[in-house]
Amino acid sequence: MGFLASIGRAVLHLLATTGSVSLFAAQALALSTRPPWHWRLIGRQMIDIGYYSLPVVGMTALFTGMVLALQSYTGFSRFAADSAIPTVVVISITRELGPVIAGLMVAGRIGASMAAEIGTMRVTEQIDALTTLSTNPMKYLVAPRLLAGMTMLPLLVLVADAIGVFGGYVVSVHKLGFNPTSYLKRTFDYLQVMDVVSGLVKASVFGFLIALMGCYHGYRSRGGAQGVGAATTQAVVTASILILLSNYLVTELFFSRR
Amino acid sequence: MSTTPKIQVRGLSKRFGPKVVLDGIDLDIAQGESLVVIGGSGSGKSVMIKCILGLIRPDAGSVRIDGEDVTKLDRRGRERVMAKFGMLFQGGALFDSLPVWENVAFGLIQGQGMARAEARAIALRKLQAVGLGAPVAELHPSELSGGMQKRVSLARAIAREPEIILFDEPTTGLDPIMADVINDLIIACVQELGATTITITHDMHSARKIASRVAMIYHGKIIWNGPAADIDRSGNPYVDQFVNGHAEGPIQMEVRPL
Ligand SMILES: Nc1ncnc2c1ncn2[C@@H]1O[C@H](COP(=O)(O)OP(=O)(O)O)[C@@H](O)[C@H]1O
Ligand SMILES: [Mg+2]
């Protein structure tokens, strides 16, 4: 009986959390459509997410593209299917690896810093202070981060796609002896608009989830430095899980009928 | 209706889990009065003040500001009433991402939509009023000493010239001279603005200096409430013990001998 009860409790807890996260998100989004708009804050968050994540995301995309070409080559050359490598690289990167890798890297970088910053503001009563100064903290702190996350991740992923494909190109041409012109031609021959678009939609969903988890866990943190630390961990872990989960769901939405 | 108290608290109760913090607080504060609330650490003074502000939702009871029950207001109504308040938080609660002047101007810029240049000029004047010059205005809160932070918080609390100002332990943790400087600043602010104030403190020197009336909170109730001049002849053994700072008396600390 104890076993069943604990499963029941876990399910109830999951449902309650889902409800309160949804409510949190809905509240922030509803507020973000109403003036006053905090352009300054939205801009700062956009720069933080979009610009300062470039090195990390660029590096991981580069190495991912490189290793993808190398692995495909060792596998495909057994079937004399080397000519498929450019296509495999570009489709894997744009559909899957670009968004997922950028998402996970940004979850670690931005999700954690949002949770830590908002969590510290919570435990040092800065969020209460906002309220006493006639400023809605959901609108001032949460809404700009959600908007910036949703809009900047797709741009970041576009860059990651380009760098990832470039990584595959470099390895293929300089190490595996491909002809540069025909590699590039093959890269774009079989690439469809939908491949890139689905990746960008994923990116937007991931950006929203990362910011939502960072803000939600930060906003609800309790009990000093330890509470903020726990909120930070929670934000990164839940964002990463949600990224992989929603990645599957969006993929199914786009490609399951083909 | 000249007898309507500025703030009227009735039956205010709040518990956290099994712990009863406020157990039916009744309090009337007249327009222009300076009430000092004394009581031991952890007796619920901060919780009471946050219930009055609406930052914590009480379990029972009412808080009337100018006769209007603010515990029943929606978000919009709460924002309107919040504009009447200024609050100095126990820990300062300065926004550490903003320079000092923007902290002070925050309520003017975000809350009232004032132009930044105009708000800055007002902030500089308020900073001068608490003895901080223009160079300090450009620093960030983390670069200031504790006494300076308290003064910035004070400037922020009075920047919008509110009708009601709440001070949560404004002198705690300061040296005696700085504490007295803060006392004088509070008195000056109150006289100039004609504000109604509630000050929480356990600094009796400060209480005697600021208060027109004193209330003592113990075990979640107001156990004594009278003119500041009567504090030494309250006839209440709890008040006597607290005012004179004796370990022996009806208030027992929960400590065991080593
Ligand atoms: N958000 C909260 N959650 C749980 N307990 C709280 C919370 N805020 C205050 N308390 C408890 O309420 C009691 C009174 O706290 P407080 O009002 O801060 O005391 P003080 O009189 O020193 O200001 C303390 O025992 C504290 O632990
Ligand atoms: Mg307190």
Image: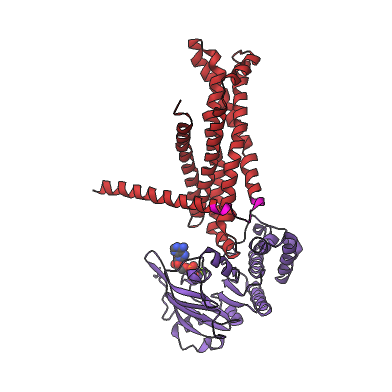
Q: Which region of the structure is painted magenta?
A: A30-41
- Residue B122 shows in the view: yes
Q: Residue at x 61, y 32 (%)?
A: A158
Q: Quadrant of the C terminus of chain B?
A: bottom left
Q: Residue at x 54, y 13 (%)?
A: A82
- Magenta segment includes A34: yes
In the image, B103 versus B112, the foreground residue is: B112
Q: Which of the 4 quarters of the picture holds residue B25?
A: bottom left
Q: Position of residue A243 (x, y in %)?
A: 48, 38
Q: Position of residue A155 (x, y in %)?
A: 62, 36
- Residue B246 shows in the view: no
**A29 up-or-down from B14: above or below:** above
State which chain is coloured purple: B
Total numbered labels placed on residues in the image: 0
Model colouring:
by chain
- Magenta segment includes B226: no
Does residue B251 appear to the left or right of A61 in the view shown? Answer: left
Q: Quadrant of the N terminus of chain B?
A: bottom right
Residue projecting furthest to the front: A257
Q: Position of residue A185 (x, y in %)?
A: 62, 17
Does residue A42 appear to the left or right of A224 in the view shown? Answer: right
State which chain is coloured red: A
